[in-house]
Image: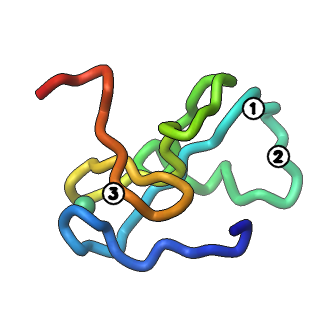
Amino acid sequence: MACWRLVRCPACGDNRFGTYLWGLIQPPLSGEPVDRLGREEVRFTGCVIDDETPRWFCQSCDADIGEDGRLIQAVSEPS
Ligand SMILES: [Zn+2]
């Protein structure tokens, strides 16, 4: 599971994704290219992680995608 890579957005089929970073982020993430990623590509989530916590988001349609590649419905936005 750790090496699983998302290939296509399950919602729109695009292949440009951003990554959700989970948990507490400590600014110097050694070895991680975080500082050359903009807000378009990285979002931070809180520390509470459950099965519905997205792992990626689609840069095209803004869909939230879980670690197993399935579409996650946004619970905070009923639209
Ligand atoms: Zn998409």
Quadrant showing the C terminus: top left
Answer whether labels 3 and 1 touch (C-beta < 8 Å).
no
Task: Please report whichever mark, 3 or 1, sits nearer to the chain's N-terminal start.
Answer: 1
Q: Which mark is residue 29?
A: 2
The x, y position of residue 12, in whole percent, is: 18, 67
Q: Is mark 1 within 8 Å of ligand 1?
A: no
Task: Name the residue furthest left.
Answer: 79
Alpha-carbon neighbours of circle 1 within 10 Å: few (<14), some, or many (≥20)?
A: few
Identify the residue position indicated by label 3 in the image. 58
The x, y position of residue 6, in whole percent, is: 48, 72
Query: Which secondary structure, mark 3?
Result: strand
Identify the residue position indicated by label 1 in the image. 25
Residue lying at 65% horizontally and 23% vertically, measured from the top left: 48
Residue lying at 27% horizontally and 48% vertically, measured from the top left: 62
Could you give the CA–CA distance between mark 3 and mark 2, rounded to whole angstroms?
23 Å
Answer whether labels 1 and 2 touch (C-beta < 8 Å).
yes
Could you give the CA–CA distance between mark 1 and mark 2, rounded to whole angstroms?
8 Å
Quarter of image, ligand 1: bottom left
Task: Give, as a three-letter code, the residue at label 3.
Answer: Cys
Q: Is mark 3 within 8 Å of ligand 1?
A: yes
State whether residue 57 is above or below residue 1. above
**Residue 76, quarter of the rendered image:** top left
Alpha-carbon neighbours of circle 2 within 10 Å: few (<14), some, or many (≥20)?
A: few
Q: Nearer the viewer, residue 28 or 56?
A: 56
Task: Give, as a three-letter code, the residue at label 1.
Answer: Ile
